[in-house]
């Protein structure tokens, strides 16, 4: 498969993933808004705490099964769902590696619809189940995933379509672990690389979910405050999940397939390096522009969004300040996702091992910062710690990218600064929307809120015009690399 074909497949996968995530976020947004009317924020905080302990218990059970008894009170309700979900992981990885786009869309759509439907039914008719509501809904979700992937591969393996595509597996038995003919029992090169990525995944889990561990075990926040933080965190990360994460997942595959891991840039095919540099620059510019827009408008509309979403439960107290900080944090999430997906695709095993030491230092410092900043600034301290940690990760990735392309004619980091007109439009929008919030929102009734929304819509339109007029290369990239692939699948 040529680099252009890989790029088209990755772009198609990213487009479908974005649409899929948009659908998921809309469904979960409506579901959470509905659920908040029936459950307390303390219950949501308990759900967050017991899910955190569950993640740890699952990790511990792989080495120390007897320790499950110590975690049984918390882990039992969802242990079965996690084990069931693991059954779908190898099939998901296989489908992702071979870019089976429609399979992922259908499987995850059916699973999410089933989960939302089950949650609504149980919240309305079996509210006394408490935590078991969320466990049962997730059990339905993972069941649909396993079923969809299993049915597809049972029908696909050995079929004419699989033979036509040259699929490496011939029958279902090939999915099971076995020794290949003429090959050693263990490929130590791959084993060492796998171990390096396992350590990296564990450290990234701490960096991603570390604040939950601090909340759960150090008791720095009440269950009510934990519930508000969890809701705001999920709401603030919506755009990151349905735009940035699909791009990161899809284009990691592109970078990994086009570049040969661990080889010097001069030893790579130069036409492939040129395409990679162009895609990396345009992707970074895209997520930075989106992140800046979210940061600017998120600040002035956080209070209104929480008031509409959860009423006074969320809009009073620390909720608006949390979401404002998270809006700025989204910009860092945007930059980190794309830079790290390139870095992890290009690193050699030695570089991955070296980076694991960096991740270990970041993980420890993050846990300490989370604890200290939370005592100083409350739940906002978690987001501040995340911002500092994410900034260091971005700095490391940027240095790696600069070093990687240093000896070439391509400089993907040089074209990232937005145009002066766009910067001006964003600055004016930030001032105008902040003044509008103070004048019209949110104590002036629905009329004031509508005026505030109208002001924001006008400013957003001005920002879009600035993007269309000045960021022509970015618009061309989106039109030629992302949009056509989606249209082709539907015409």
Image: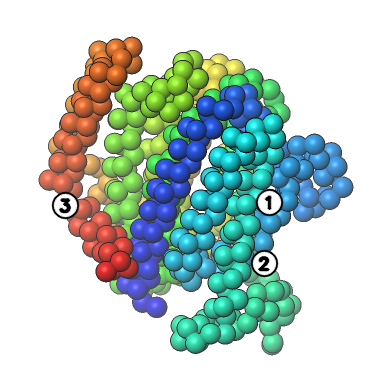
Q: Look at the numbered discs 3 and 2 and tell me whether their residues touch, using CB distance below 8 Å.
A: no
Q: Earlier in the sequence, mark 3 or mark 2?
A: 2
Q: Up-down: is 5 above or below 82?
A: below
In the rendered image, residue 252, in percent from the top left (x then y), is placed at 45, 60
Compute the Cα span from label 3 to label 2. 45 Å
Residue highlighted by disc 1: 82
Q: Quadrant of residue 158?
A: bottom right
Residue highlighted by disc 2: 191
The one nearer the camera, 199 or 289, is 289
Residue, x 62% and y 39% (percent of image)? 122
Q: Earlier in the sequence, mark 2 or mark 1?
A: 1
In the rendered image, residue 308, in percent from the top left (x then y), is placed at 39, 25
- With 434 as the anchor, is 41 left or right in this view? right
SS for callout 2:
helix
SS for callout 3:
helix
Looking at the rendered image, the disc whose residue lies closer to the viewer, 1 or 3, is: 1
Residue, x 57% and y 65% (percent of image)? 148
Residue highlighted by disc 3: 472
The quadrant of the image that shows the C terminus is bottom left
Looking at the image, can residue 372 be seen?
no
């Amino acid at each position: 498969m040529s680099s252009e074909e890989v790029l088209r497949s990755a772009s198609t996968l990213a487009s479908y993933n974005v649409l899929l995530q948009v659908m998921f976020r809309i469904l979960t947004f409506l579901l959470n808004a509905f659920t908040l009317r029936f459950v307390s924020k303390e219950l949501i905080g308990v759900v967050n705490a017991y899910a955190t302990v569950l993640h740890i218990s699952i990790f511990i059970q792989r080495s120390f099964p007897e320790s499950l008894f110590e975690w049984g009170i918390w882990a039992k309700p969802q242990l079965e769902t996690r084990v069931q979900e693991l059954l779908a992981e190898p099939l998901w990885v296989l489908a992702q590696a071979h870019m089976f786009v429609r399979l992922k869309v259908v499987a995850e759509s059916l699973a999410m619809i089933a989960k939302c439907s089950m949650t609504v039914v149980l919240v309305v008719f079996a509210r006394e189940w408490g935590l078991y509501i969320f466990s049962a809904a997730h059990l339905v979700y993972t069941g649909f995933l396993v079923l969809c992937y299993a049915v597809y591969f049972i029908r696909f393996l050995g079929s004419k379509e699989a033979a036509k595509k040259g699929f490496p597996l011939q029958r279902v038995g090939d999915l099971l672990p076995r020794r290949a003919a003429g090959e050693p029992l263990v490929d130590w090169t791959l084993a060492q690389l796998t171990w390096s990525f396992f350590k990296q995944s564990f450290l990234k889990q701490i960096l991603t979910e570390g604040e939950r561990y601090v909340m759960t075990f150090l008791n720095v926040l009440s269950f009510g405050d934990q519930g508000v933080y969890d809701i705001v965190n999920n709401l603030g990360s919506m755009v990151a999940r349905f735009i940035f994460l699909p791009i990161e997942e899809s284009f990691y595959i592109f970078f990994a397939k086009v570049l040969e891991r661990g080889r010097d840039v001069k030893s790579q095919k130069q036409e492939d390096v040129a395409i990679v540099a162009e895609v990396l620059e345009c992707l970074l510019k895209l997520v930075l522009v989106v992140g800046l827009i979210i940061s600017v408008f998120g600040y002035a509309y956080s209070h209104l969004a929480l008031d509409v979403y959860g009423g006074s439960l969320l809009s009073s107290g620390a909720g608006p300040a949390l979401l404002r900080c998270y809006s700025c944090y989204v910009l860092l999430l945007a930059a980190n996702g794309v830079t790290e997906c390139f870095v992890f695709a290009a690193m050699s095993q030695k570089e991955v091992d070296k980076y694991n030491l960096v991740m270990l230092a970041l993980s420890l410092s993050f846990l300490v910062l989370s604890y200290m900043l939370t005592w100083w600034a409350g739940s906002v301290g978690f987001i501040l710690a995340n911002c500092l940690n994410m900034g260091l990760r971005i700095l490391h990735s940027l240095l790696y990218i600069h070093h990687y392309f240093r000896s070439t004619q391509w400089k993907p980091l040089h074209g990232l600064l937005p145009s002066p007109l766009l910067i001006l439009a964003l600055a004016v929008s930030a001032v105008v929307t902040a003044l509008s919030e103070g004048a019209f929102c949110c104590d002036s009734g629905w009329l004031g809120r509508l005026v505030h929304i109208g002001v924001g819509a006008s400013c957003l339109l001005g920002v879009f015009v600035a993007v269309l007029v000045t960021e022509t290369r970015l618009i061309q990239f989106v039109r030629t690399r992302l949009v056509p692939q989606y249209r082709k699948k539907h015409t």
